[in-house]
Image: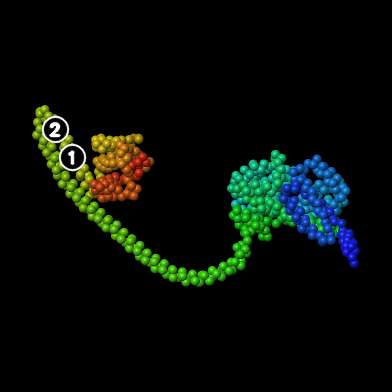
Amino acid sequence: MGPSILALLLLVVTSASASALPEPKRILVLQSFRNAMPVNSDFFAGIREGLELPIDRPVEIDSEDLDLSRINDEKYVRKLVEIYALKYRASPPNLIIATHTSAVRLLLNHRDKLFPGVPIVFCAAELSSEELERLPPNVTGVTSKGDFAGTLELMSRLHPDLRQIALILGMGDLDMLRESDVKKAVRPFQTRFEIIWLHGLPLSELVETVRALPPHTAILYVVQFGDRNGVSYVPRKVVQAVSENANAPVYGLWDTLMGTGIVGGRLISIEQQGVMAGKIARRILLGEAPASIPVVRMEQNLAIVDAQQLKRWNIDERLLPEGSRILNRDSSVWEQYRDIILVVIGLIAFQALWIAALLRNRQRLQRTQTSLNEQYDRRVRAEELARRLRARIGAADKQNTLGALAGRIAHEINQPLIAIQNYAQAAKRYVATDSPKGGKLAELLAEMAGEADRAGAIIRKIRKLLTTGHIDAVRVDLDLVLKEVVAVMKPEADACGCRLDYRVTAPVPVVLADALHVQLVVVNLLRNAMEAAASDPRGRGGSVSLSIAETAERRVRVSVADSGPGVPAEEVEDIFESLYSTKTTGMGVGLATCRTIVEAHGGRIWCTANPAGGALFQFEIPVAEAEAEA
C-alpha cells in the first residue's frame, strides 16, 4: 500500500472520529460582582470542580461580570438586559449559572427577554421563602444565608469580657439590603452588649475609628461595597485595612475574607457553593430535569477561624464550639522533621551517657569547691565581726573614760570659776564708789561675775544631763534665743570670712526647753557650718544660714545650712555617734552631745545634703502646750 493511500485512510478515520464527538454544551456564568472581586474566582473554581463531566461530554464555559454591587439602578439593569439579549440572541447558552442574589433576581425578572426556556442554576442566593416558592420549573440551585446571629454568638463565646460590638455596614445598594436583617439579628444582643454602628464611613475615617475603639470591643464586618459619599470598595481590601489598624479583633461572614486578618466567624463557603451548583449543573447536562432537583439550602454555616489570629488576640481554642474548623495552623516540628529528629535523638542518647559520667565527676568537684568557698566566707565574716566587736569595745572604753574625764574636768573647772566669782565680789566691795573710774570698773567686775556664773551654770547643766539625762525645761521663745546666739557668733563669722544670715518665715510658737542647752546645740552647729563654709575648695565666699519654722506636726524646726563641701553620703549615719569625727583635730563629742540634748527635749536631729550645695543640719523640738487659764 503506497504512502498516499495510507494518508488518505488516516484522514478518513480522523474525520469520522471528530464527527462522532457531540457538540459541546455551552454554559454561561453570570457573576453579580465585577471582575476585580476575589469572590468571582472562588465561585468559578467551585463550579468547575463540581461539573466533572466525562470526556465524551465536552463543555464550554463563558462568564459575564454584571457589577451589580456597584451599580444596581433601573437604567443600568435595563441596559444590561438589552446588551445580553442582543449578544446571545444568535447563540444562546444551554445552561446558565448565576452567582449571588443580584444576578439571580435579574434573571428571574428578565428571563423571558434574555434566555427564555434556558435552565438556570443559582448559588449563594439569599432568597426569601416566597421567592423560592415562585421559582419556575427549570430553575433550581443552592441558597445561602449570612449567619449574623451565629457569628455574634461566636464572638461573645470567644471573648468572655466582651462589652461592645462594632458593626461595619456600607451604604451601597447591596449594603442597604442587608440592613434590616442585621438589625433583626442584633436585637437579642442589645441587652448584653453596646452596639456601635459604623455605617457608611469612608475608608480613611473607618480606619481612624477602629484604631480608637474602647476596650473589650469586637468588630463584625457585615459588608461595605460603598460609603456615604458613593465611593465603591472591594470588600476584601476594606477588611484588610480594618484588620491591620483595628485595636480589636475582626470577624466576618464569608470564607473569602480569611487571610485578610479576620479571626473568623460562621462563614459562608463561597467555593463550596460553587461546587454544589456545579454538581446540579452536571445532572442537568446529563439529562436530568431541573424541576426534579430540589433547591439545596446551605444555611448552617460552619465556625471557621484563623489560628494565627487566635494567637494574635490571645483567644483560647478550647472556647471554640465543637466541630469548628481551624485554618493556618502551624504544623508541629515533629511533623516537619520526623526523620531528622529520630536521628538526632539517637545521637543525643549516645552522647548523654558519656556526658552523664563527666557531669557526675564535675558535680563532685563543684561540691568540694562550694564547701571550700563556704568555709572561706564563714572565716571572712567571723574576722569582720571580730574587727567590728573590737572597734565597739574600744569606742565604749573611750566613751566611759571620757565620761569620767568630763565629770572630773567639770569638777575641776568649777573650782576656779567659784574663785573668780569670789574675787570679783571682793573687788567690787573694795573699789571706792567715789573714784572717777570706780563705776566702770564695778560694771566690768559685775560682767566678770555674771559670765563666771553663766559658765558655772553651763557646766552644771551639762554634768546633770550627762549623769541623769534630765533637763530643766521652761517655756522659751526660741526666736529670742536664736537672736542672742547670732549676736554672739557674728564676730566669729566675720573673722572666718563667712556671711551669717538668720531668717524667720513666720511667727514661731513657744517651746518647752532649756534655753542654755538649745544655745549650746545651735552654737555647735553654727561653728561647724562656718568652718565648713570657710574651707570651700572652690574659693568662693562662704555663707551660713540659720532659719526657724513651725512644722505641720506641731514642732519647731531649726535649720543650719552652709555652702561648704558637704557631708559624704556614707558618713551621714555616723556623724552623730560618740567619738566619730570627720576633722583631724576633732574628738567626736560635739554632735553626739547635740543629739543627747535634742533627744532629752523629746526631739530629733539629722543631716541631709543642702540643695544649694553643702550640708543642711536640722533639729526639731515639740511646741509647748498652751497654759490653762486661771
Residue bearing mark 2: 442
Along the viewing direction, whichever of 10 and 173 lies nearer the viewer: 10
Residue 227 appearing in the image: yes
Residue 94's label in the rendered image is none
Whether residue 482 is situated above or below residue 181 in the rendered picture: above
Query: Residue at the spot x=89%, y=65% of the render?
Result: 2
Which numbered dot is residue 453?
1
The percent position of residue 305, horizontal first and vertical second, equals 66, 55
Q: Residues within 10 Å of mark 2 (few under 14, many from 20)?
A: many
Q: Nearer the viewer, residue 67 or 390?
A: 67
Q: Is residue 553 left or right of residue 317?
A: left
- Where is 209 relative to 122, above or below? above
As shown in the figure, which amino acid type bears the numbered disc 2? Ala
- Indicate the amino acid at tag 1: Asp
Q: Horizontal and vertical percent for residue 56?
A: 84, 61
Q: Residue at x 71, y 43 (%)?
A: 232
Q: Residue at x 77, y 45 (%)?
A: 68
Task: Please tell me whether mark 2 sits on a helix, a strand or a loop.
Answer: helix
Q: Quadrant of residue 267?
A: bottom right
**Secondary structure of residue under mark 1:** helix
| Quadrant (top left, top right, bottom left, bottom right) of the C terminus | top left
Residue furthest to the front in view is: 2
